[in-house]
Amino acid sequence: MGAALRVAVVGSGPSGMYAAAELLEGNKATVDVFDRLPIPFGLVRYGVAPDHFSIRSVRENLDRIWDQPGIRFIGNVTIGQDISVDELREHYDAVVLTYGASADRALGIPGEQLPGCVGATDFVAWYCGHPDANREFFESYLPTIEHAAVVGLGNVAVDVARILAKTPAELQATDIPEHVRNTLASMKLTDIHILGRRGPAQATWTTKELRELGELEECQVVVDPVGLTDDQAWVTDEKVHQRNVDVVRGWMERPRLEGPTLHLHFLTRPISVAGSVHVSVVQVERTEFTASGSLASTGEVLDLPVEFLVRSIGYRGTGLPGVAFNDETGTVVHVDGRIEPGLYAAGWIKRGPSGIIGTNKKDAVATVESLLADAGAGQLSTGTGAIDGLIAHRGLEVVSVAGWRAIDKAERDLGAQFGIDRMTISDQATLVEIASLGER
Ligand SMILES: Cc1cc2nc3c(=O)[nH]c(=O)nc-3n(C[C@H](O)[C@H](O)[C@H](O)COP(=O)(O)OP(=O)(O)OC[C@H]3O[C@@H](n4cnc5c(N)ncnc54)[C@H](O)[C@@H]3O)c2cc1C
């Protein structure tokens, strides 16, 4: 191969960082990694639960990629807004889109737009300290509520329920920002409901995550037995699902105690949300399996007092101008990560919100293979290489690795004041200001 390629990667989450690492190996390319935030690592910072220390420590591995020669971080730049995909294509030999899937799926039920009904994306962003989170809403609303419900039977639903259920002491060692801890600590939740339309055998959570619910300091798990007489709710050929079933069965045998309760409702789905100024009631309907294994309504309807409803039924991607996009799947249109020669995708925007962090590595490597095959076949047009000129011309205040390192240090210093490793700084202006001091 001739001179190293010049590649732009859009998004510094795991898939972007893994794509960059693969391109850097053997000096195949120099890489500029763009992110709309002044901070790298995407959902590893703003999704993975703050109390899951070992998974969050993946950040340290990703951070080491910045130490390699030939890579730059160009943070605080939104592609599609500050710079278009077409402009990137003009300036680089190839562009890899790894901007994730950050929109949430709606339930499509009446009343869903009432204040107090939010997507997991919003709530997770808030407790992780994402700069875009609606702080004002969560901080004024959450202390007023007593009943919460989370819709979904996946790991994100479990994360949301667990963060709501934990005591301040259980969250002490996390990097959750101070304003979030204070709000969570001031909440007076008596009941948290997890609502899933299927049974324990169909839930997609992992057993490790599920078990953690049974280990909470104050909050006890109570399984609603309605619907669970149906064998199909319990039967599975998959080992992981079988382990989940065993955990749920074990909980059904526990005696019920006084105190805050996490209710698990299976074969139950929300059909409407009601309230005068905010959510106050969620109407749920009981479902049952038909002989063919599909779900049908039993006609049994129940009103649950709930002032905070979090839908956790999946994340989805959104399109960028000039990029072929499939609205149904919420992913870009591609073959083996190739949207067209010169334009590629990896991670959640390529395959949808599935798999674990490591899945993005294999996925990014496969995409880079497509890119290199096109380069080898002479299918890439050479970019101008003049992106810095465009950035300066637009007056964009970019954050580099030095800026990110300054933020990293500031967060560690802040954490030290609280006796913890790190505390997340969430305010966008503060982050950019700290970064700018590091750039000097
Ligand atoms: C709540 C939650 C908890 C999770 N917990 C776990 C877990 O415990 N274990 C596990 O293995 N996996 C977990 N995951 C999954 C894991 O986070 C994903 O697999 C992974 O982050 C996907 O990587 P990605 O790079 O495709 O997207 P992302 O991580 O979302 O990164 C996308 C990046 O693109 C940037 N971006 C977006 N739009 C633009 C734009 N227009 N211009 C520039 N930049 C842009 C974003 O700021 C972001 O940094 C969790 C996911 C969620 C949502």
Image (cartoon, rainbow, N blue to C red):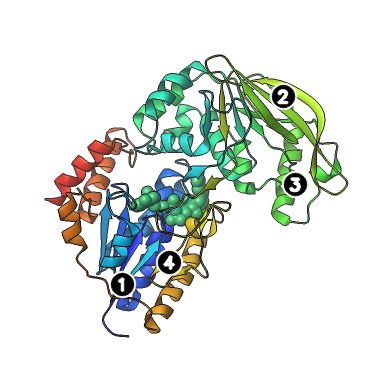
Q: Residue at x 42, y 24 (%)?
A: 137
Q: Residue at x 55, y 29 (%)?
A: 165
Dot 4: what SS?
A: strand
Q: Is residue 342 above or below residue 281?
A: below
Mark identifier at residue 344: 4
Q: What's the distance in space between the residues labelled 2 and 4, CA to CA?
A: 53 Å
Query: Can you name the residue that lies furthest to the front here?
Result: 322
Q: Is mark 1 within 8 Å of ligand 1?
A: no
Q: What's the distance in space between the residues labelled 1 and 2, CA to CA?
A: 63 Å
Residue bearing mark 2:
256
Q: What's the distance in space between the residues labelled 4 and 3, CA to CA?
A: 37 Å
Dot 2: within a 10 Å radius of its alpha carbon, few (fewer than 14), some, or many (20 or more) residues?
few
Examine the image and state in which quarter residue 281 appears: top right
For marks 2 and 4 on the same chain, the one whose residue lies earlier in the sequence: 2
Residue bearing mark 1:
93
For marks 4 and 3 on the same chain, the one whose residue lies earlier in the sequence: 3
For marks 4 and 1 on the same chain, the one whose residue lies earlier in the sequence: 1
Tell me the quarter of the image containing the N terminus: bottom left
- Amino acid type at circle 3 is Ala
Dot 1: within a 10 Å radius of its alpha carbon, few (fewer than 14), some, or many (20 or more) residues?
many
Dot 3: within a 10 Å radius of its alpha carbon, few (fewer than 14), some, or many (20 or more) residues?
many
